[in-house]
Image (cartoon, rainbow, N blue to C red):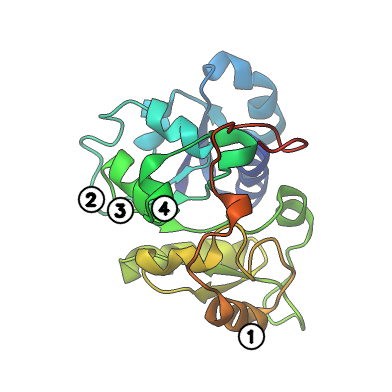
Amino acid sequence: MRIGIIGAGQIGGTLTRRLTELGHEVWVANSRGPETLSALARETGARAVTAREAARAGRVVVVTIPEAAVRDLPTDLFEGVPDDVVVIDTGNYYPRHRDGRIDGIEEGKVESGWVSEQLGHPVVKAFNNIRAKHLLENGKPAGTRGRRALPVAGDRQADKEVVFALVDELGFDAVDAGSLDESWRQQPGSPVYVTELDADGVRSALADATRERKPEWRATERSPGTFVHPA
């Protein structure tokens, strides 16, 4: 399958490596231009392209950039992209650490709902609760006892089925986390965020989540700071 990846940071770079290993044709883009991705392209066999080309690469597009950077994407990035293209949002909102204040999210909108509005295309939220190193190294064959599971939330079941299959290929069990409006259950600060849980554990953690955003995940007047010194 041809997969576009917009963002070549920790998760984007890891997905580029893993998905090309699995035989997928990956078109990868970043904010600095294809020429800055030559090393990753040589390493993986991925094709370095522009964001606009990645958005039109094929069946699946992964948007894996800082939340605040979503506002910097071209407003027509997904214009003309077929409705049945599956767009995966891996992002998290880190207002005190990196992103600063995003009004819509601060006012109660779920993070991926806000992203979907900016992109003008439905999204599936996935790969946001796992560290890049674990995504790279911790995949296990299907049926392995204790195999780690990842939540997948979205409004279109057909889209989620595509993502379930990719999660399984990457070595993890996929857990249906409900609609996009329910994706707050896997946002930072939730019981499932950056945890090592099997499918039953993920289901339990999702059920235990509370919607109120904790103070450490809300912007302050000084935001943003850094991951070392949140503001």
Secondary structure beneath label 4: helix
Secondary structure beneath label 1: helix
Q: Amino acid at mark 4?
A: Ser
Of tags 1 and 2, the one toward the viewer is: 1
Q: Is residue 160 left or right of residue 156?
A: right
Mark 2: few/some/many CA within 10 Å (<14, 14-19, 20+): few
Q: Which residue is mark 2?
A: 83
From the viewer's perspective, is residue 28 above or below residue 155? above
Q: Amino acid at mark 1?
A: Asp
Q: Residue furthest front?
A: 221
Q: Which residue is mark 3?
A: 122
Of tags 4 and 1, the one toward the viewer is: 4
The span from disc 4 to disc 1 (Cα, nearest Å) is 24 Å
Q: Position of residue 95 (x, y in %)?
A: 56, 41
Q: Is residue 21 left or right of residue 160?
A: right
Quick check: marks 2 and 3 in contact, CB under 8 Å?
no
Q: Is residue 115 left or right of residue 9?
A: left
Label ID, residue 112: 4
Mark 1 or mark 2, which has the lower sequence index?
2
The span from disc 2 to disc 4 (Cα, nearest Å) is 17 Å
Mark 1 or mark 3, which has the lower sequence index?
3
Q: Amino acid at mark 3?
A: Pro
Question: Residue drawn 78% across and 36% down?
Answer: 228
Q: Amino acid at mark 2?
A: Asp
Question: Residue drawn 46% across and 50% down?
Answer: 89
